[in-house]
Image (tube, rainbow, N blue to C red):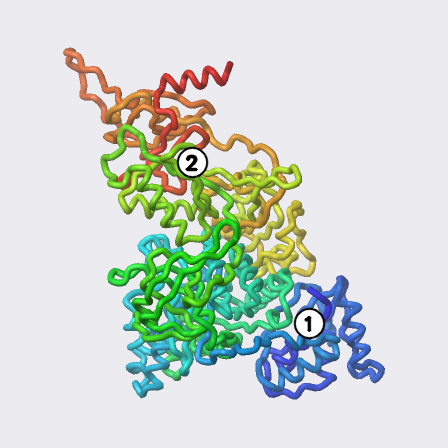
Amino acid sequence: MTRARLFLSAARGFLARRGDPTAGSHSAGAAVTADSFLCHVSRALSSCSWIRSADLDPSRPEIGPDDLNRSLLRNTSTCSLVSSVPHNGGSICRAARPRSYRYSTNAASATDAAGLAEAAGLHDDPNEGSISEGSTRNEAIRNVAIIAHVDHGKTTLMDRLIRASSSTAATTAGGGGGGGGGGGGGGAGGGGSAAADLPCDRVMDSIALERERGITIASKYTSVTFRGTTLNLVDTPGHADFGGEVERVMGMVDGALLLVDVAEGPLAQTKFVLGKALQRDLKPIVVLNKCDRPSVTTQMVHQVESAIFDLFASFDATEEQLDFPVLYASARHGWASSSWPPPQLSMAGSDPVSAAAAAAAKGESGVVPILEAILDRVPPPVVDPTAPFQMLVSLIDRDPFLGRLLIGRIASGVVRVNDRVRALTRDSEGEAFSLEESKVVKLVKRRGVKSEDMSEAAAGDIVAVAGMTHAHVSHTLADLSVSTPLPVAAIDPPTIAMTFSVNDSPLAGRHGTQMTGPKIGARLKAEVATNVSLGLEGGPSADAFKVLARGELQLGVLIESMRREGFELSISPPSVLYREERGKKLEPIEELMVEVDEEYAGAVIDTISLRKGELLDMITESSSSSSSSSSDSSSFGADSSSSSATSSPPPSTSPSSPASSSSSPSSLSRTRLLFTCPSRGLLGVRGVLNTATRGTAVLHRSFLRYEPWRGRLERGRKGVIVSMATGTITAHALSSLEARGTLFVSPGDETYDGHIIGENARDEDMEVNPVRTKELTNIRAASKDENIRLTPPRQMSLEEAMGYVQTGELVEVTPAAIRLRKKELSSSKRKTTRRNQKE
């Protein structure tokens, strides 16, 4: 970040607060004077050592704006913006990270900030924000995406925005405030009748797997009307494996809501989605969510704001992007505020439900401040209404009556029902060609949870077009007079690959209906056509297909969807996609953040180190104290230093940090570890860490970059127990095997030669007969046979099985079961192969 930006942030922070920054209350109407501004900046400046604010005494007549500016430019290279604290009757500054400030958008503050920017030598680009000749802005539309890390509350916030807009529309139409509140939940959303419009919670998670796993897998959009303006809202996934869904919808929007959990701060995927938004020159609106938690303090909020500011600065954000507003919200309870502490909490103490009900009783606006921020801060789309119709397809949906719906933002012109349009794309050599021509059968607009038919749609709006049969994502729908497709944004490449092939085990065909190679290939081609982050290549045989993806979870969702559709297939172990540059082998490196109980931090470090991971940072936070033991006061975010590939020692405890409370056996501490690790080292690591930490580890990972190959990995798994017989597994056979390792099967399961039924306690594989029975004799036993009690087997999920198998092994996937097996089923052939390898 440049020195000028630091100065401008200090100036704007002062103007937004309009008062003493150390005071408990912020007087918005306080007059701005040169003396008070100098006092604020003097408190905001500190070097690595302690300095007194008297060093920049505003009462000294020899200090003028030029002197202040020169002093700022001299000092900001080694100082940080901090909060001053009283000391011996004066103010003294403590070194810390830059603090994130809220920025005022009123005319007086904008004028003063412009003057201060001019004094600091900053000048706005006159061409910035200008539009080309013939273009205009569609003031009736705002297009915005909601981006965040996984489980930070995006989809829940979408529910509240839909409810709030419905309530506002009902009130505007004379609906009497939406039915008089309707209780705490209805009041939080802005009206009881609005809440009834949603059939369920997390209404945007319409895919069955999304509701089962509690995550958003595919991007989806809807629109709401607020104060006469159409707001097109795009809900995006928060998991790193589905980052392609975020990338492809960034071209549809002109702004973004960056949602951050105030208790966790910006995490790995926050960094990814923010970087994509800033690359598109979007100006995000920051929303700190889950502010209703009792553990949230003012210090914590300031730390998270500082971490977010650092994250913006690490991407070299522009002045307008750094001028982001901050809102404080609880999506779960349906309220938002532009100030801290939120008035909803002051109404009813720390009880969030009572706070929401109290806000509704007093006529508070729920999450309307977020809608107002979208209306004020997101620019209207720049369009050319006179140009021919063009639309880039970004999403694909299906309707039981209309078939395929191509969703995208209209770039120019107007489209009407029954218009003739063509689908344009480019071949492998970059030449444009027409894929098909067809008639627009329907124009569909998503409003809230319902769909409405339209007779025409204008440039800048997001709509769905029905009638095309071959067009896919990244294709351009255009008027017949257009011959050049719209440019397509680059998508980050896949990092891992798996081979999908026909299931040829002895148990194949018992439960599935889609088993042949052509059917598997057709299904994969259809998936790749709608998911731009996936790739498809030919496999080692005609019935094998190599699928390229971002991560194990993305592949796991695809495989789970196929098995629910009746497919049976065999899956190879995931492999990493390498690169070759200047004769050097490069591999994908990921940023891994692990949150774990302090007692298991050593086990996590050992596990990741064996997988060629490098520790970048370690922060321990005690549940009995709101402060961190690290010298980094903004311990919530991914700092810009996390992009470094070199390992750095954990930060030492700073004498200035608040002392942690005395620990006791009953007190719990959580440690946050930040690593860089090769993608191949993270395959299957989730299950290993869950075992090593007794299920207390929480992992967040995202792709970082390609780096030189870090060398061979240590053996990360023991040998396996392999069946050498076919039949039904017996309890008698398993009773003698469970002491030899961990079993994956139960008595009564079917097995076959080559089926992996457990993990050996030793490094080598062990072949056994799990179907043998107890021999019967004609000798009467003196007592009854004792009952056989077996340890429950280890049950693997699909993702765990994918990360467990190694070279020479496969995952057998059917609608009824997930099994592990050897690629070579014959026991005699496996022995011959091992003998040849030894020789």
Judge the density around disc 2: few (<14), some (14-19), many (≥20) Cα neighbours within 10 Å. some
Where does the image place residue 634, in percent across and percent down from the top left?
61, 61
Judge the density around disc 1: few (<14), some (14-19), many (≥20) Cα neighbours within 10 Å. many
Q: Residue furthest front?
A: 481
> Toward which corner of the image does residue 359 lie, by quadrant?
bottom left
When the figure is inspected, residue 481 is found, relative to residue 369, above or below; the finding is above
How many marks are shown on the rendered structure?
Answer: 2
Q: Identity of the amino acid at label 2?
A: Gly
> Toward which corner of the image does residue 224 lie, by quadrant?
bottom left
> Toward which corner of the image does residue 157 lie, by quadrant?
bottom left
Q: Is residue 324 left or right of residue 459?
A: right
Residue at point 42%, 69% (across, down): 233
Q: Identity of the amino acid at label 1?
A: Ser
Q: Is residue 762 visible?
A: yes
Q: Is residue 310 left or right of residue 294?
A: right
Residue at point 60%, 64% (across, down): 312
Q: Is 735 or 234 nearer to us in this picture?
A: 234
Q: Earlier in the sequence, mark 2 or mark 1?
A: 1
Q: Is residue 203 visible?
A: no
Quick one: SS at disc 2?
A: loop
When the figure is inspected, residue 740 is found, relative to residue 700, above or below; the finding is above
Label disc, if present, on residue 84 of the rendered structure: 1
Label disc, if present, on residue 373 of the rendered structure: none
Q: Which quadrant is the N terminus positioned in?
A: bottom right
Where does the image place residue 319, in percent across and percent down from the top left?
64, 71
Where does the image place residue 496, in percent across and percent down from the top left?
49, 42
Residue highlighted by disc 2: 539
